[in-house]
Amino acid sequence: MTLTDSTQQHQAPTYGNWRRPRSPGLGRLGLGGTIALFSGLILVIIGMAINFVIGLVFGLVVAVFMAPLWVRDRWGRNGYEAMAEQVGWVRQRRSKRHLYVAGPLSRTPVTKCALPGLAARLEASEAHDAHGRPFVVLHHPRPGHVSTVMECSPSGDALVDPDDIDQWVAGWGAWLAGLAHEAGVVGAQVSVETAPDTGVRLRQSVESRLSPNAPELASATMREVIATYPGGSPSTTCRVAITWTRARANARRRTVDDMAVEIGSRLPELCTGLAIAGAGAARPMSLGELSAAIRVAYDPEVATVVDEAGGAGLVDWDDAGPVSAEERRGAYLHDGATSVSWVMGEAPRGAVRSSILRRLLAPHREIARKRVTLLYRPHSPGDAAQIVDNDVVDAMFQATQRKVTRARDSLVVRAAAKAAEEEALGAGLVRFGMIVTATMPGLDADAVNRCVSVVEHLGLASRVRLRRAWRSQATTFTAGLPLGLVLPAHLALPGDWRERV
């Protein structure tokens, strides 16, 4: 008889096999660049047939045109994308669109402080779910999206059995995969924010439970806890936003009221799924609660006032934005605070553990407020099958372009084949990104520089390559808020076309 050792160490599973989407094409050109190259070669051949000098001139023009498409930086952007970003920034500065002033000093007759930028057209209302709880309904008119936001209370992984953590991760993966089967879901957003604890909630909770007949020593001890415990202690808030599209196949768009009814019927099940994934007690946020949270993000100084008022009902949606804001090349100034935002330039390479983002998500004494937002775009089962099959073909095509196959090309082919195999077995396909925003009170340049250094170090510790959002700080700051924005839908050229080209 063989005895098993009950003290065997827990073998933590690893995760990975994510790939950056690539369009088919020759080398670094992609599909659009390859089409442009062959079109240029045809012009050169025609010019050669007419006259050698004309063909030579055409060849020179094609070479000058193709050079920016071939040259790419470490983030994968070609020369034209870099030039377009620089030109857009110069035009924005000249037209003063990098400045925002609301309230009585604004140029408009409206005295409200509405949200700026991408969120300026957001329409907010409130409805009730199947359990009678109020929830916010955010309508994005341009892409025709409707979003709602839920607040979670995760307990963290401290003193938690590793097997339970593995179950949470599996539940989170199942929850994300289940979004692909939700009719009309086009995006999801998870925002984890750490900030100094104001101590208001603790004081209100303790004072409401103090008995007037309690011993003097017990009362003094509890009052000392109220006075000393919040000092330097952080608070962590987790919010999840889900976005649906109003579009239907071969039919007119659904109305916002119809979407609110449909979302309200689905919210209880979605909240239950988040609880299984380790998010704790999940509940929908009301319009007043979300308005207060957005107002605090723009003006951290009002956090104490908002907590004392209980959050809901204090701030109207039309007053959730900043009074004044200025976008600079590498920072965003708003209501006396300075924010710096980053985007994920590259996901962690290789296999990772479930605790890979722990240091990036944890509070840090050098950062007053930090918000890490994960953006997800689930694909329907039909689209997922086509995407992974195309990825396998594209990876094999890229690997066969060279006479000597590189080890990296072989790994890419195997990763694409593994993804196709997992999708065939029922796994979901989700595209993801990340936005990190750090906010410091005041305009102290030294404090901001220390904050930037700390965040970039935390990104390296989590094996995530963060790219500072140069010349797009205001947009990135807004996209990191729990508003359910699906960024590719707000581009002039749709995101799907940009990825194909």
Image: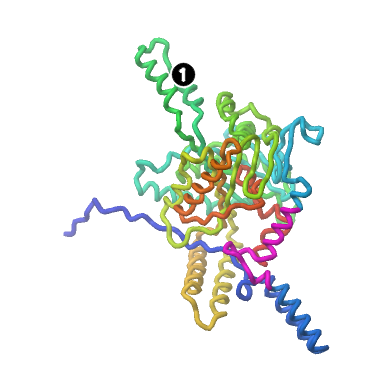
Any part of residue 334 in sight: yes
Please, which residue is most extreme toward the front here? 446
| Residue 155 x %, y % | 43, 39
Residue, x 56% and y 27% (percent of image)?
304
The residue stretch that appears in magenta? 67-90
| Residue 99 x %, y % | 73, 42
Give whichever of 95, 213 is nearer the camera: 95
Residue, x 35% and y 48% (percent of image)?
162
On screen, residue 144 versus residue 232, left or right, reads right
In the picture of the structure, the residue carrying the numbered disc 1 is: 207
Q: Is residue 43 above or below residue 428?
A: below
Quadrant occupied by the C terminus: bottom right
| Residue 362 x %, y % | 46, 43
Q: Residues within 10 Å of mark 1 (few under 14, many from 20)?
A: some
Any part of residue 269 in sight: no
Please, which residue is most extreme toward the left here? 1
On screen, residue 392 versus residue 336, left or right, reads left
Q: Amino acid at mark 1?
A: Glu
On screen, residue 349 versus residue 439, left or right, reads left
| Residue 209 x %, y % | 44, 19
| Disc 1 secondary structure class | helix
On screen, residue 226 versus residue 139, left or right, reads left
